[in-house]
Image (spheres, helix red, strand yellow):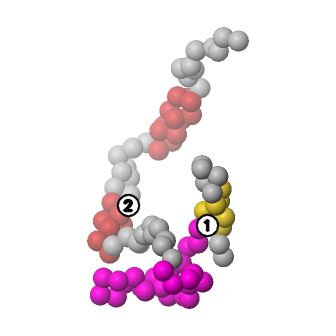
Amino acid sequence: MWNRWITEKGGISMTRTIRARVTRGMLAPVEPLDLPDGSEVEITMATGPSEADVAASRAAAGGWKGKVDAEALIRNIYADRLIQTRPVPRL
């Protein structure tokens, strides 16, 4: 499904998210594309976390347990939100 947007210059831009597989350094769409041959597209790539990143995140989880009083931290956060730091607007 295509999403249509009006660009800053008044043109129309269409976006669509697809899945692709990398084979020998080339992207191969997993699903058919409804674009004419020779069409130019802009690609934004997103990948999932690596196994090392997931392992590091899991190893760090709970690392602060017992070192921080969570209830006191929450109270301090809410108290700090009540502090007025902006000047009163002059109308």
Mark linked to residue 59: none
Q: Image point 48% across, 37% down: which residue? A: 72
The residue singled out by tag 2 in the image is 61
Q: Position of residue 74 (x, y in %)?
A: 52, 40
Q: Image point 57% across, 81% down: which residue? A: 35
Q: In the rendered structure, which amino acid carries the disc numbered 2?
A: Ala
Mark linked to residue 14: 1
For label 2, the SS is loop
> Residue 61, can we see it?
yes
Is residue 20 magenta-colored? Answer: yes
Q: In which quadrant will I find the N terminus?
A: bottom right
Q: Which residues are magenta?
A: 15-38
> Residue 55, can we see it?
no
Q: CA distance from mark 1 to mark 2?
A: 40 Å
Whichever of callouts 1 and 2 sits on the residue coming sooner in the sequence is 1
User: For the residue carrying disc 1, how many other residues have a C-alpha within 10 Å: few (<14), some (14-19), or many (20+)?
Assistant: few
Q: On the rendered structure, is 49 left or right of 79? A: left
